[in-house]
Image (cartoon, rainbow, N blue to C red):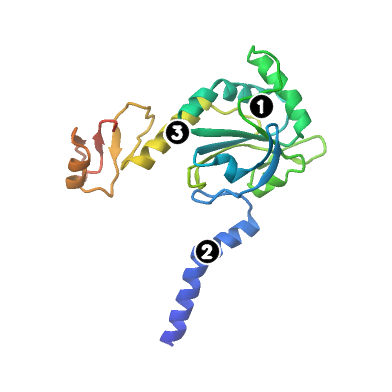
Amino acid sequence: CRASCWGTCCFLHCFSVSGLRFLRAAIMPGLLLGDEAPNFEAETTHGRIRFHEFLGNSWGILFSHPRDFTPVCTTELGRAAKLAPEFAKRNIKMIALSIDDVNDHLSWSKDINAYNKDEPTDKLPYPIIADSKRELAVQLGMLDPDERDKDGIPLTARVVFVFGPDKKLKLSILYPATTGRNFDEILRVIDSLQLTAAKKVATPVDWKPGDEVMVIPSLSDEEAKKLFPGGVCTKKLPSGKNYLRYTKHPK
């Protein structure tokens, strides 16, 4: 009986660790935090790529769009182009995705540059993936079931994926097709991701670079004193629990 129970427990453990991911992938395509990005191949405005080789050892951001020559997407890609130096400063490789072909992407790029009041060329500081069959959008779980084209086919939602240098998903934000993204907020979140990946801190509500940060709960007071010689301030609470611990933004 004990052997049978042990076997059952082993099966459940294995299922919960790996089988659940397999089952989830089969039923509901898409990525969860911690998943490794698929090393897909795709045609883009900068030529054919393999995603892992494109990322290299950098962080990466993949942002999807419902369709070329649409108003909200044009404003978003224009803003992304203007912010390209900020992403480069953070060692972030940028790449977009839309459900039209490369020729449409190149033609649309002229409109995007014109929107930015730049020379209307077909060059943008990041590639746009051609996903005319929606294969990648389906694989990555990017379709918006409530927004459809004239043929009744679901459009790609406005997804933001941020990948770390280990190719694993660190952030996922999903917007409906009708709502444009705030790229200043995306940069703020990336600053938090990169800081908290390197230091044993967390960032509180409305945090901005340079603001105080919070000591993570798994760190003891003694460990915190050693790690943060600038001091740790603990807020007194009615519960008597000392979990609100602040320190200066680490260098």
Image point 72% across, 32% down: which residue? 67
Residue highlighted by disc 2 = 18
Check the image and report above or below for 55 versus 86.
below
33 or 54: nearer the viewer: 54
Q: Earlier in the sequence, mark 1 or mark 2?
A: 2
Three-letter residue code for mark 2: Ser
Q: Which mark is residue 189?
A: 3
Q: Earlier in the sequence, mark 3 or mark 2?
A: 2
- Say whether residue 234 is left or right of residue 165: left
**Tag 2, which secondary structure?**
helix
Residue highlighted by disc 1 = 73
Of the 4 image quadrants, the one containing the N terminus is bottom left
Gap in Å between the C-alphas at discs 1 and 2?
Answer: 37 Å
**Tag 1, which secondary structure?**
helix
118 or 25: nearer the viewer: 118
Q: Which mark is residue 29?
A: none
**Coordinates of residue 41 in the picture (x, y in percent):** 68, 45
Of the 4 image quadrants, the one containing the C terminus is top left
Can residue 165 be seen by looking at this rendering? yes
Three-letter residue code for mark 1: Cys
